[in-house]
Image (cartoon, rainbow, N blue to C red):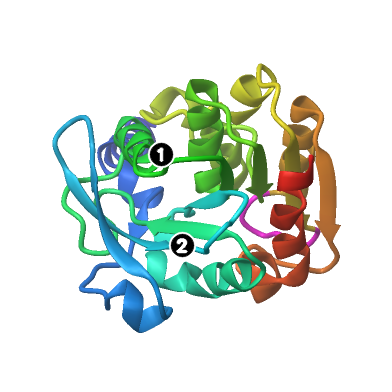
Amino acid sequence: MLIAVAVVVTIVAVVFAFQRKLVYFPSPGPLPSAEEVLPGGRDVRLVTADGLLLDGWHFEVRDAPATVIVFPGNGGNRLGRVPLARELTDRGLSVLLFDYRGYGGNPGTPSEEGLTYDSRAALDLIDGPVIYFGESLGAAVAVELATHRAPLGLVLRSPFVSLASVGSHHYPWLPVKMLLQDKYPVVERVSSLDVPTTVILGTADSVVPPEQSRAVATAARARLIEVAGADHNDEVLLSGSQVVDAVLSVPSN
């Protein structure tokens, strides 16, 4: 019995110490210039309130009704979001792609507080109307930013109820809620917003359970788009027509 207890305590202690490595999966740099990935793009530098300099790409479209700020999920870097930027700019919207601290060669280590600073730095870079597009963890970042400054609209792709809720789904044998340092209470925050919101989910999502995204849609009083048979990282949820059309519909709201 004592050995079993010691094993459990050890596992919990290790998970607590390294929990952010189970949440954030950054891909490093260096990355090409904005002009290399999309003609007309320019490299930009975001300055956070805690003194970090983060790299991003700004793709401006003349007379665009809004700029879409893309808040990435917990993996990869902004290079993986270029197909979405290409589709949106081709349809007349400007786009800002940026990487959080620790991603894409940026300095720093990701955390909920840090990503809050990063999102505000991204917003500070843009003059004029904005749309927030958040994917998975990025949906949580976008929702928090909307409590700070409301956009024209929110498009949330595969959002979760809270980090503890999705963590408990994947690690039901751990006291996730007690252990987590980063909370991301999406439903709690989105329910207080008065912003036109669209939630997009894949019905075969193996990372964020579809019922959690539906709960976010209910709390946000949002339009819900369900992409049949789509898993979390399928191309149709990254830059597919239903995703692009959902973003394009925001300026007309």
Element type where label 1 sits in the image: helix
Is 174 on the left or on the right of 19, as rendered? Answer: right
Q: Quadrant of residue 123?
A: top left
Q: Which residues are magenta?
A: 203-208
Amino acid type, label 1: Leu
How many dots with numbers?
2
Report the residue marked by disc 2: 60
Position of residue 64 in the picture relative to residue 70 (left or right): right
Please provide percent x and percent y for residue 170. Answer: 57, 48
Query: What element does badge 2 sit on?
Result: loop
Taking the image as drawn, is residue 76 in sight?
A: no
Q: Residue at x 68, y 65 (%)?
A: 237
Q: Amino acid at mark 2?
A: Glu
Q: Which mark's residue is nearer the viewer, 2 or 1?
A: 2
Which one is earlier in the sequence, the residue at label 2 or at label 1? 2
Residue lying at 76% horizontally and 61% vertically, measured from the top left: 245
Point 33% across, 78% down: residue:
35
Q: In which quadrant is the C terminus drawn?
A: top right
Between residues 207 and 101, which one lies in front from this camera angle?
101
Residue positioned most to the front: 63
Q: Confirm whether the magenta stretch covers residue 206.
A: yes
Determine if the magenta segment contains residue 165. no
Left or right: 160, with 24 as reference point: right
Residue ID for mark 1: 123
Q: Nearer the viewer, residue 7 or 232?
A: 232
Q: Residue at x 37, y 43 (%)?
A: 122
Q: Nearer the viewer, residue 24 or 91?
A: 91
